[in-house]
Image (cartoon, rainbow, N blue to C red):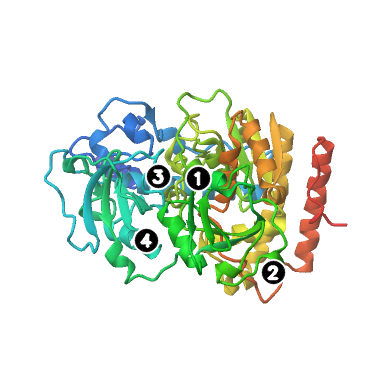
Amino acid sequence: MAKAFFRLQKFLRRTQFLLFFLTAAYLMAGSLLLLQRTRLVIQQGSRGTPTNQALPVPEEMSRVGIIEPRTLQSPGPRLLVHMDALQEPALDQQHSPHWLVSRNSELRQLRRRWFHGFTSDQEPLQTAGFKAMKHTAEHKGTYMGCFTHDSRERTLKGAVFYDLRKMTVAHCQEACAERAYSYAGLTYGAECYCGNSLPAAAAKPEECNIECKGEKGSVCGGVNRLSVYGVEDLRARTRRRRNAIYRGCFRAPENLTDTFPASLIQPNLTVEMCSEFCSKKEFPLAVIRGQECYCGYPTRRFPLREGTDGLRCSGTRNASRAAGGQDCLVYQTPVQDTRCTDRKFLTTKSKVFVALSSFPGAGNTWARHLIEHATGYYTGSYYFDGALYNKGFKGEKDHWRSRRTICVKTHESGKTEIEMFDSAILLIRNPYKSLMAEFNRKYAGHLGYATDRNWKSKEWPDFVNSYASWWASHVLEWLKYGKRLLIVHYEDLKQSLIPKLKEMVEFLNVTVTEDRLLCVENNRDGNFKRSGAKQKNFEPFTQEMKDLINRYILTVDEALRGRNFSGLPREYVPR
């Protein structure tokens, strides 16, 4: 009996040890897999940066928001992304709809996914003393040399393009040639500038030493340096997209020569001739009166706000017969108005933490474009969106709590997320338009449109049922917990841009000039406007959906008035 018991005890001990070993192996394998999936890899030679530290950024690079791995060891202000940016903010479920939990989770996953892609995508750069990389191989333009670059006083004043991951010399050349510019310049490995005048100050060839993000072995400028290519030869073979945009018929100012810095008198003057002349002079406006062509900017003398009767300015392409007397035709050239394009991070941390809050699809990105160009400071974001960064929103990569941006974009509506801001601009848009815009973004990106199949699927009714209540709760929660609010209606901002933008700028405690605001108005659309209003051949909203949305509209309108704010615009409030 004792012998049998001893054998059983020995067997159990072996089994216990085996189970313990298998359990330990299972846990170790799971831990390794978890570490492998969550590890953030930053390539910087053989030395890495601890994942619990912020990435140190040299001051000259922090201005443009681009990190170079070989410069991470240099002293400088600490910014970009701390690891707490990846942690999920606590969601107050008592004050948020149940469907908001999944939506916020989706947004946080987007932040993690983009940040991981950004950090793992950094490429080590060539050393400063490297021999010049290839400039001509696979490039159709003529390399003009390396030049100094100042983002505030740009020499290449035409169109600007960004691509953090796929910028190549050929891509920049083609983009500038398609718009009939003479030169294409690249800097910081990801930025492309177009223009018609060659930069005056040349730099040493070795100072253009940053590799293109999308093309190994090719140079895309350097720190405050431009790699410039001539694209004259490409223009003849490239489809032109440089047609002037008609702005309208306006009363001519009293003294044309004092108002406009450049002019041309030409018999049989055409719109194309005047636009080409003003483009070469780097002016955004071409103004035609009879045989006279004037170039300049919108100013207090010529603000382009009140047009005259269009019948007084014939729409004919022959400009010599198009206008006469005190009226003139105004056209927009492809040259960008650069008086308001200089932007930077705040030099000192802001004492007031300001949110730019809105429901998705309510025009937050457009409002950021207006604010950045009006104030000259970048806006931040609670999220990380690479597509927005590539369009020039460099505050996307700055940590949202850095207080180096003039305000921070957010769609959050929980009590905790609201109360951490000192004040907020609350942007409200017609929920019918907001829902459609967000549905388009969800299925086709910032500039695309959802397909008819998407609209007719069961996902659209589910989307409306959940997101319509979010539209209402977003406003109600901010009215309840927001400390200091400025209510801005998208429709009012669109209709009365300058007065409403002045209110927003004053709320941000920034002083701007009238000419800068006119520049913003001249660049009002930005890079994130969907082309056209793609009409659908069916009504996406059922009567049941309309009844639901209208109830939310009335609720929000009543809440706004109860807080002594003006109610929602009458154009979409049910009667």
Residue 26 visible in the displayed image: no
**Amino acid type shown at disc 3:** Phe
Pointer 2 with pointer 1, Cβ within 8 A: no
**Residue 115, numbered label:** 3
Pointer 3 with pointer 4, Cβ within 8 A: no
**Crowding at mark 1 (Cα within 10 Å: few <14, some 14-19, many 20+):** many
Q: Earlier in the sequence, mark 3 or mark 2?
A: 3
- As measured in the structure, the alpha-carbon distance from the residue carrying label 2 to the one carrying label 1 is 29 Å
- As measured in the structure, the alpha-carbon distance from the residue carrying label 3 to the one carrying label 2 is 35 Å
- As measured in the structure, the alpha-carbon distance from the residue carrying label 3 to the one carrying label 4 is 28 Å
**Residue 108, numbered label:** 1
**Amino acid type shown at disc 1:** Arg
Pointer 4 with pointer 2, Cβ within 8 A: no
Mark 3 residue element: helix
**Crowding at mark 4 (Cα within 10 Å: few <14, some 14-19, many 20+):** some
Report the residue at 62% width, 53% height from top.
Answer: 361
Closer to us: 270 or 74: 270
Q: Viewed as shown, does residue 44 lie left or right of 427?
A: left
| Location of residue 417 (image quadrant) | top right
Q: Residue furthest right?
A: 575
Position in image of residue 350 (x %, y %):
53, 25
Q: Quadrant of the N terminus?
A: top left
Q: Which residue is mark 2?
A: 540
Mark 2 residue element: loop
